Image: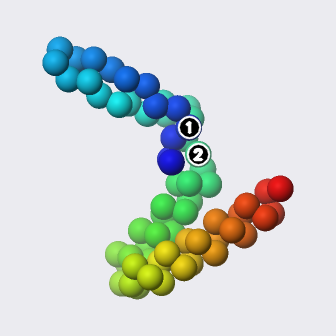
Amino acid sequence: MLFGTIGEETLGPLHLHVPDPASLRPDALALAAVAFVLLFALHRSIAETLAVCGGLSLLWWYTSR
């Protein structure tokens, strides 16, 4: 999740889920940016991207404990 808090806005018949910009998680944003670069700039496969992002998330989790 890129955002920690998501609110709901009602505009007539529409019910929209709107993220709170103040709750942006920088770690999730960095991981999404790495995945974007791997997939679209470097043309890596989905399997490679998942492996790299999974490894980075585990490393981030172990170092933040």
Left or right of residue 61, residue 33 in this image:
left
Residue beneath label 1, please? 4
Query: Residue at position x 69%, y 68% from top?
Result: 58
Dot 1 crowding, Cα within 10 Å, few <14, some 14–19, many 20+: few
In the image, residue 48 sits, relative to residue 65, either above or below, namely below
What is the x, y in percent for residue 33? 48, 63
Q: Nearer the viewer, residue 22 or 2?
A: 2
Residue beneath label 2, please? 25
Left or right of residue 42, residue 25 in this image:
right
Q: Can residue 61 be seen in the rendering of this structure?
A: yes
What is the x, y in percent for residue 35? 46, 70
Q: Nearer the viewer, residue 41 or 25?
A: 25
Q: Point out the residue furthest to the left here.
A: 13
In the image, residue 4 sits, relative to residue 60, either above or below, namely above
Res. 40 image quadrant: bottom left
What is the x, y in percent for residue 64? 79, 57
Query: Residue at position x 64%, y 75% from top?
Result: 55
Colour scheme employed for the rendering of this structure? rainbow
In the image, residue 32 sits, relative to residue 55, either above or below, namely above
Q: Secondary structure at mark 1?
A: loop
Query: Residue at position x 80%, y 63% from top?
Result: 63
Q: Are marks 2 and 1 in contact (CB under 8 Å)?
A: yes
Label 2 sits on what residue type? Arg
Label 1 sits on what residue type? Gly
Query: Residue at position x 64%, y 71% from top?
Result: 56
What is the CA distance from the residue labelled 2 to the residue labelled 1?
7 Å
